[in-house]
Image (tube, rainbow, N blue to C red):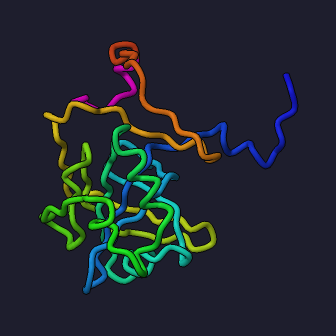
Amino acid sequence: MEVLPLSRAFTLIEPGPVVLVTTHDGHKDNVMTITWTMVLDFSPTFAITTGPWNYSYAALVGTKECVLSIPTADLIDTAIGIGTCTGRDTDKFAKFGLSRALARHVRAPLIPECLANIECRVIDIVDPHGIIVLEGVAAHIDNAREERRMLHAVGDGTFIIDGPVLDRKEMMRSKLPGGL
């Protein structure tokens, strides 16, 4: 094996899919791209990483709600564009041609162009690590959407998209929650 610089080790442990996080601060909607996400267990509990350097952070902390919108491979350039500008001076919905749909439980909008949207409430903030723990309160999916491959950021400017599904449900049945 070759030596990998320790500064690149994070690229080996790729997190969950790229998500677009929508917020509403009481005055306007915003959307940011987050590439470090995770599920915490088999419940609708998730974590994202962000902090005060992101314009949406104040809305997350202030309103304690957001929507996690899951883009697919066809939205890669949109996701990157959203992540490389700030909502402080840009209406990202207009700039990137995204629609807004009314959520049922939070003020942040759903993004209909995405495969799925999860309405969430902030239940914890782990300040030293920029971790925001979210509880899903409603989920929506577009089962008619043709493109379903999700994006995964490696962290070095490259992305991986979902590939073929390897079904091992029966082999893992004893470890899966009922209903899956």
Residue occupying image coordinates x 50% and y 52%: 35
In this view of the protein, which residue sits in the foreground, 103 or 173? 103
Image position of 2 (left or right of 124): right
Q: Give the percent coordinates (x, y) of residue 5.
A: 84, 42
Can you tell which quarter of the image residue 8 is in? top right
Q: Give the percent coordinates (x, y) of residue 120.
A: 29, 62
Residue occupying image coordinates x 38% and y 69%: 123
Q: Give the percent coordinates (x, y) of residue 130.
A: 56, 68
174 in the magenta segment: yes
In this view of the protein, which residue sits in the foreground, 138 or 150? 150
As drawn, 53 above or below 37: below
Q: Give the percent coordinates (x, y) of residue 81.
A: 44, 58
63 in the magenta segment: no
Image quadrant containing the C terminus: top left
Can you tell which quarter of the image residue 90 is in? bottom left
Residue at the bottom extreme? 27
As drawn, 118 above or below 120: above
In this view of the protein, which residue sits in the foreground, 12 or 112? 112
| Magenta residues, start to end | 172-180
Residue occupying image coordinates x 28% and y 66%: 93
As drawn, 150 above or below 133: above
User: How many numbered discs sit on the rendered protein?
Assistant: 0
Image position of 121 (left or right of 37): left
Image quadrant containing the N terminus: top right
Residue occupying image coordinates x 34% and y 68%: 92
Can you tell which quarter of the image residue 59 is in? bottom left
